[in-house]
Amino acid sequence: MSARSVLVTGTDTGIGKTHSSVALLHALRASGLRAVGMKPIASGCDWIDGRWRNEDALALQAASAPRPDYADVNPVALPEPTAPTLAAIAAGVTVDIADLYAAHARLALTADVVLVEGAGGWDAPLAVGLEHRDLARQLGGAVVLVVGLKLGCLSHARLTARAIEADGCRLVGWIGNRIDPEFARADDYVGLLADALPAPCLGVLPFVADGSDLPATLSLDAGWIATL
């Protein structure tokens, strides 16, 4: 089959898009699919082996099979840990959108599914002239939403789902991520989200403390891939 692409976005920044994307990559691979991750634009990078590299992009690369070149996983690596548009200005970088799509095309040549992680929430711009909706449409329109389970997440998730659909894209699934270990009503909120969102829940990930290597797992329905 030809490669299919999914854009992974979130209800906010810092709610576990990478954690969820890695879990989804492993689930796709467990289903027998070649799955690779991509983070087209990453801010907050470290100088490693002669080039800027991003921790999240490295995690996506490590979870991919076949293992892609880092330059294709993360074509634009920006040092400052801030909004990508500001980080690009600070670095004196002009993002070439055609280069991003070319890198994605190279990944798609060797994969069944390419997971593309965005930056921040749905309405946060990726670069001057590039919104999440533009990227999602270019890749086929399929979007997975990561919901950080905390107070306020129900409104954030519903608003994001409406925006995704209004922007001409398709919400094909959502993942709950337990980012607050003190949030006692998380299970109840998962139920409310399941009723409110127009797409299936692909799983709820446990809280993972910083530095923990606890593996996150998802179990995908055999027919879910057909919705992409």
Image: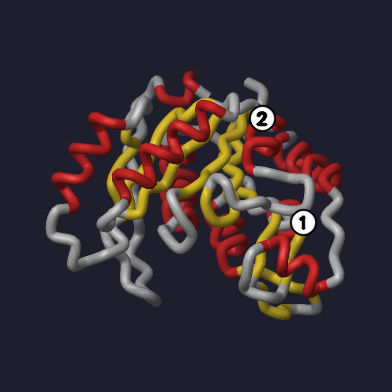
Q: Which amino acid does label 2 sit on?
A: Arg
In terms of secondary structure, where does tag 2 sit? helix
Residue type pointed to by label 1: Pro
Is residue 45 depicted above or below 113 in this figure? below
- Specify which label sits upstream in the sequence, 1 or 2: 1
Q: How far apart are marks 1 and 2 (CA)?
A: 19 Å
Locate residue 76: give its quadrant.
bottom right
Along the line of sight, the residue nearer the viewer: 15 or 25 = 15
Residue 78 in the figure: left or right of residue 67: right
The percent position of residue 94, horizontal first and vertical second, equals: 86, 59
Please report contact status of discs 1 and 2: CB closer than 8 Å, yes or no: no
Residue bearing mark 1 = 75
Callout count: 2
Please give the residue where the numbered disc 2 appears in the rendered image: 137
Mark 1 or mark 2: which is in front? 2
Quadrant (top left/top right/bottom left/bottom right) for the N terminus: top right
Kindly identify the residue that appears in the image at 43 percent across and 34 percent down.
161
Where 114 sits versus 60, above or below? Answer: above
Nearer to us in this view, 111 or 187: 187
Residue for point 68% across, 44% down: 131
Percent x, y of residue 82:
62, 70
